[in-house]
Amino acid sequence: MKQTDFEQLHQGKWQAFAENVQALRKGQPQLQAVQHFAQDYRGICQHLALAKQRGYSYPLIEELQQLALQGHQQFYRHKSPALQQLIGFVVVGFPATVRAQWRSVAVASALFFGSLTLMALLTVWFPDLIYSLMSANQVASMENMYDPANRIIGPMSARDHQDDWVMFGFYIMNNIGIAFQTFASGLLFGLGSLFFLLFNGLHIGAVAGHLTRIGYHETFWSFVIGHGAFELTAIVLAGAAGLKLGSALIAPGRLTRANALRDAAKISIRLLGGAIIFLFIAAFIEAYWSSSSSLSVTTKVTVGAALWALVLFYLSYSGRGRYAPQ
């Protein structure tokens, strides 16, 4: 069946389902709509599967994905307690949203990891380049943090182990601040998110390149590889959420900018919510694992590599086959 015929055949059902979802959100559903909601929801999911199987256009698939996600949320909203809703978001909603917004995530990844990699290489080749981003005192302080002679590696390395809980809170506040800054600045037509993705990428890349060049690579990489899987990915996702806001302002399509921004914000908030969960995990790992001097470099690198693989697998496959956008 051609896409135009498919749309003409089912467009009325999609519109009616969208209206029912809105009524449920407002707490004003019609009895008949409630009685047939589960059946209509399964129909939307079936149409989404058919659209993907037949290779229909991305806008149509994205529309059906959003309807399926909205239906999923309403279907389980009153049936599941808060904990189950959180689990549903973590297992299905968040990774499915990341996959559905893969274009924004890909752009954010290219900006952040591209600038990080390029700056790391340039700093190795041109050692004085780091001083274009950091002062001499900042460079000296950073070298002291990751000096292999230190008892505890990383920021505030002179702390005692009993201070790990304090550092956990510090990492959370610092990292969430960076993520929210990267996200919220997307309201400047995406330019703010673009800036912070590049700025953080260049800064982290300069640090990585400099410490690798002076021979502190074991202490630095073994420290950052574990929590970096969650922390760096969270920065990218916060940036993708900000770019989503910016794109709605720049190219709202047939909608007004206000309506386009409102629709984009619903998606961006889910991305940011997942990024914050990642940052909590990163803060815990950084406070209790990364700074530990009792673990070998090999152990830290092996576990860190496994965590990177886990994050990629989770975002790519978690929740597939469920009735949520993919």
Image (tube, grey):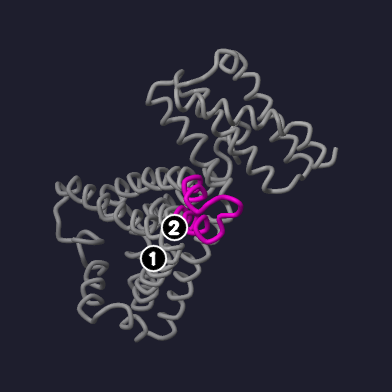
Tell which of 193 and 278 is nearer to you.
193
Q: Position of residue 249 (x, y in %)?
A: 49, 58
Dot 2 lies on which element? helix
Q: Is residue 10 left or right of residue 151?
A: right
Residue 11 against residue 108 in the figure, above or below: above
Q: Position of residue 199 (x, y in %)?
A: 38, 70
Q: Earlier in the sequence, mark 1 or mark 2?
A: 1
Q: Classify the position of the N terminus by image quarter.
A: top right
Most common SS among magenta residues: helix
Residue 213: name its quadrant.
bottom left
Indicate yes or no whether the magenta region holds residue 87.
no
**Residue type, mark 2 in image:** Gly
Dot 1 lies on which element? helix
Indicate yes or no whether the magenta region holds residue 241.
yes
**Residue occupying image coordinates x 46% and y 24%:** 77
Tell which of 206 and 98 is nearer to you.
98
**Residue type, mark 1 in image:** Phe
Tell which of 21 and 96 is nearer to you.
21
Query: What label does residue 187 carry, if any?
Result: none
Q: Classify the position of the C terminus by image quarter.
A: top right
Which residue carries the number 1 mark?
196
Q: Is residue 270 left or right of residue 280?
A: right
Q: Position of residue 116 (x, y in %)?
A: 44, 69
Q: Position of residue 239 (x, y in %)?
A: 44, 58
Is the residue marked by circle 1 packed among few (<14), some (14-19), or many (20+) residues within 10 Å? many
Which residue carries the number 2 mark?
239
Residue 140 appears in view: yes
| Residue bounds of the magenta highlight | 240-264
Q: Are marks 1 and 2 in contact (CB under 8 Å)?
A: yes
Is the residue marked by circle 2 packed among few (<14), some (14-19), or many (20+) residues within 10 Å? many
